[in-house]
Image (cartoon, rainbow, N blue to C red):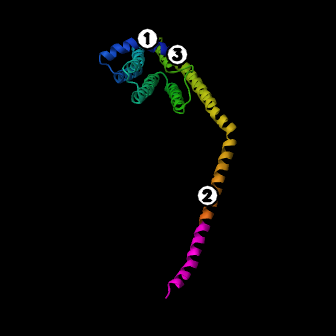
Amino acid sequence: MLDGRWRAGVERGLGPVGDRLRRLGVSADALTIFGFSASIATAFLIATGHLGWAVLGITLAGLGDLLDGAVARGGGETGPRGAFFDSVADRFSDAVILLGAAWHLSTVGPRLPVLAFGVAVCSMLISYERAKAESLGLSARGGLMERAERFVMLGFGLAFGLLVPVLWLMLALTGITAADRFRRVWREAAKPARLSVTHSPRTPRSSRRREASGRDAAGAGGELRAWWERHRIAERRRGRPAAARRTRP
């Protein structure tokens, strides 16, 4: 939801910052690594109970995720390699932060780490649905709980000591988002199938007619060639003795 409404405007606002960083020699990959490292530090801070400092870590990780795109676009570094690296780093960052949350919750209750694990599973499913849909030429953007919303809500829970209630809310909203994306992609993917069913009766019939006519033509040509070969062989056999008799003294 935030990605669709505000991300484009935020990226345009960060464009000058990205240009400045690029002129200073900072690459998009370096910023991706910075955000990745900030996520690891955030996970360690959450696991050790330093929740206030973890808010700063989440902020830095999100800032690195925004700036690497601005630097890549400003320097013309956008491409499949950078996009793949950024996507993998984002998925690992999400997982490691929630792993730190699970470690921290293990000191609060023996079953609470499962809560963080459930949020991680739903988050990975949301990301996978989008990636798979886009690889098929479909769209799976949007939803109540995209990556930006997850960062904001988790930061809120860490800042105000509401980690467990916020994780329960995140679990519900990520589950709804995953189900909604599945529904939208399922309906969009069914549209070409309906069109193909509507137009398919004519095409196979015409193709079958073309194939049948081709086979008939090929069969007729083959029979004609076979008859001509048999006729030539018979003519040669009949002509050779007569020629032989004419050449004898």
The answer to whether residue 137 is left or right of residue 209 is: left
Residue receiving disc 3? 2
Residue 105 horizontal side relative to residue 196, left or right = left
Comes first in the chain, label 1 or label 3: 3
Horizontal and vertical percent position of residue 162:
50, 14
Give the number of the mark in front: 3 or 2.
Answer: 2
- Residue to which mark 2 is pinned: 218
User: As rendered, which of 9 and 224 lies closer to the eye?
Assistant: 224
Q: Look at the image and give the residue range highlighted in magenta.
A: 226-249
Instruction: Locate residue 226, reporting x and y percent.
Output: 60, 67
Label annotation for residue 13: 1
Say which of marks 1 and 2 sits in front: 2
**What residue sits 50% from the left and 25% below the top?**
116
Q: Secondary structure at mark 3?
A: helix
Identify the residue at image location x=53%, y=81%. Answer: 243
Q: Earlier in the sequence, mark 3 or mark 2?
A: 3
The crowd level at tag 3 (other Cα within 10 Å; few <14, some 14-19, many 20+) is some
Residue 32 falls in which quadrant of the image?
A: top left
Of the numbered discs 1 and 2, the one sitting upstream in the chain is 1
Image disc number at residue 99: none
- Kind of residue at badge 2: Ala
Looking at the rendering, in which quadrant would you find the N terminus?
Answer: top right
Q: Residues within 10 Å of mark 1 (few under 14, many from 20)?
A: few
Specify the amino acid type for callout 3: Leu
